[in-house]
Image (cartoon, helix red, strand yellow):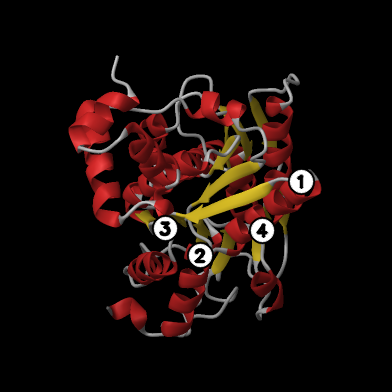
Amino acid sequence: MTGLEDVAKLAGVSPATASRALSRPELVAEATRERVREAARTLGYQPNVLARSLRQRGSRALGLVITDILNAFHATLAKAVQDVADAQGYTLLMFNTDEEPAKERRAFETLRGHLPQGLIVVPTPATHRNLDLLPGLPVVELDRASGRAGAYTVMVDNEVGAYRAVTHLAALGHRRIGMIVGRLDISTAVERHEGYRRALLEAGLPYRPELVLPGDHREAGGRAAAHTLLTLPPAERPTALFVGNNEMTVGAVLATRDLGLRLPGDLSLVGFDDSRWAQTILPALTVVAQPAYELGALACQTLLARLAGEPVPTSVRLQTTLIERDSVAPPPAGRPLSQTAGSA
């Protein structure tokens, strides 16, 4: 079995220097640090993070890795985790990955050197592989599920939330309901898409693939997808849109303004996630609201309970709430749209 001495020998340094390079990299010259890391990668060396953490009980730190700190939903998750950690005397080491597996991996590499006692992560599609960097570390997955066997997860019931939103639109008489969906390699997007499909099926409406476009969880993607859907020929254009997260919803609202569309006169729109802006714009948006603060707090409480050896459920699902505001109405019943984008 490869040990620290093997890494030190390959890197041409002492075992003490190799240990510092991996656990306290800020104390080691950059060239030496990189040499040691390269040796560790070459030999496949992975320190036992949990064992080292237990030997250093004075360090009361937790890791938090989220995917988009600019997203208000994720910012609220982070605040809730921070509040619970602070109340229990823990330091929080937070990283933002921008949905990029490579950034997530670098965050885990950094955490490996700082010995947190546990980790809360909003997963990317590569989390199940990247967590190999932190063997033995207690982990709670927040908002999304990576698909790892035996993972502890704290999420909402995305499928039911989406189902209720689309059922609401269908009950108002909409027959062409489009969806701007997130990345289908992420669990939340998959579940919300499944809820959309189930609602159409139960309403007796066909699933039209051409009315479902990806928005990549970002404002720009939502805006581009909405532009495409709202410039379809009039007979094919959706009369309502369900949008899979708040950033894409911002993009969809901007697209309606680009095209001169009125909400809800020309188009009904429901977003997934609530926020202050959704409540204060005109018209205020109908949304599927998630209990974001409760999710973050519960994830941290779950992790702390695991660290204390207390029994906790491996999977918790909180419920969403459909909040009806002013961006939804019955379809325009054949009235022409108030814009000319349909000829595009």
Q: Are marks 1 and 4 in contact (CB under 8 Å)?
A: no
Q: How far apart are marks 4 and 3 (CA)?
A: 16 Å
Residue 159 tag number: none
Which-is-in-front pick, marks 2 and 3?
Answer: 3
Q: Which of marks 2 and 4 is nearer the N terminus?
A: 4
Q: Name the residue under label 3.
A: 98
Which-is-in-front pick, marks 2 and 1?
Answer: 1
Which-is-in-front pick, marks 1 and 3?
Answer: 1
Q: Earlier in the sequence, mark 1 or mark 4?
A: 4
Can residue 277 be seen here? The reply is yes
Q: Which of marks 1 and 3 is nearer the N terminus?
A: 1
The kind of secondary structure element at disc 3 is loop
Q: In terms of depth relative to the viewer, which is nearer, 122 or 9? A: 9
Q: How far apart are marks 2 and 3 (CA)?
A: 13 Å
Disc 1 marks a residue whose amino acid type is Gly
Q: Residue at x 65, y 79 (%)?
A: 281
Q: How far apart are marks 2 and 1 (CA)?
A: 33 Å
Q: Which residue is drawn at 55% across and 80% down?
A: 262
Q: Residue at x 64, y 40 (%)?
A: 59
Q: Name the residue under label 4.
A: 76
Q: Which of marks 2 and 3 is nearer the N terminus?
A: 3
Q: Distance between the residues labelled 1 and 3?
A: 28 Å
Q: In terms of depth relative to the viewer, which is nearer, 329 or 161? A: 161
Q: Residue at x 68, y 26 (%)?
A: 306
Residue 89 tag number: 1
Q: Residues within 10 Å of mark 2 (few under 14, many from 20)?
A: many
Q: Position of residue 240 (x, y in %)?
A: 52, 62
Q: Name the residue under label 2.
A: 247
Q: How crowded is mark 4: few (under 14 residues within 10 Å), some or many (20 or more)?
A: some
Q: Position of residue 197 (x, y in %)?
A: 48, 40
- Residue 72 in the figure: left or right of residue 38: right
Q: Which of marks 2 and 1 is nearer the N terminus?
A: 1
